[in-house]
Image: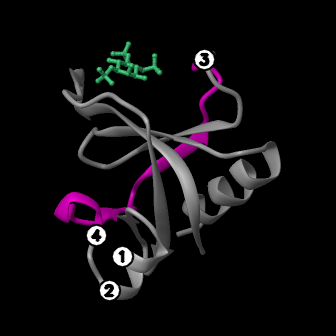
Amino acid sequence: MEGYLGRKHDLEGPNKKASNRSWNNLYCVLRNNELTFYKDAKNLAMGVPYHGEEPLGLRHAICEVAADYKKKKHVFKLRLSNGSEWLFHGKDEEEMLSWLQGVSTA
Ligand code: I3P
């Protein structure tokens, strides 16, 4: 699946806050157990990931509704096996839940 989500990097590793903590609206692509980010669909077509980032490997990742994050609605949290954590913001509940399901079953 693919589409736009807001993204915030919360933790870089266990108990280590990410340095860049701002929200970005990114074109997200879920394929082959990996989540890759692009500035937009055009950059996906050109194969140019956002800021040259490596894809996030979802093996052993944990994904759940971010019930403790109160500043926005429709946010889910992704914790990777290396301890890094990311927040994702969908435009509505349905979009958030479909990504949550997709990422959980990746
Ligand atoms: C961050 C930005 C984020 C904010 C974060 C700030 O500043 O305002 O929106 O997260 O707060 O550090 P900057 O863009 O200058 O990097 P929230 O929207 O969740 O508040 P935080 O450090 O408390 O996570």
Classify 10 Å Cα crowding around label 2: few (below 14), some (14-19), many (20 and above).
few
Q: Nearer the viewer, mark 2 or mark 4?
A: 2
In percent of the image, x 21 and y 65: which residue is there? 54
How far, Cα to Cα, is label 1 from label 2?
A: 5 Å
Q: Are marks 4 and 1 in contact (CB under 8 Å)?
A: yes
Q: Amino acid at mark 4?
A: Pro
Classify 10 Å Cα crowding around label 1: few (below 14), some (14-19), many (20 and above).
some
Q: Is residue 65 magenta?
A: yes
Classify 10 Å Cα crowding around label 4: few (below 14), some (14-19), many (20 and above).
some
For mark 3, give the secondary structure.
loop
Q: Which residues are magenta?
A: 49-69
Asked where in the image residue 52 lies, by quadrant, the reply is bottom left
For mark 4, give the secondary structure.
loop
How far, Cα to Cα, is label 3 from label 1?
A: 30 Å
In percent of the image, x 24 and y 22: which residue is there? 17
The residue that label 1 is drawn on is 43
Residue 3 percent coordinates (x, y):
59, 66
The residue that label 4 is drawn on is 49
**Mark 3 CB within 8 Å of ligand 1:** yes
The residue that label 3 is drawn on is 71
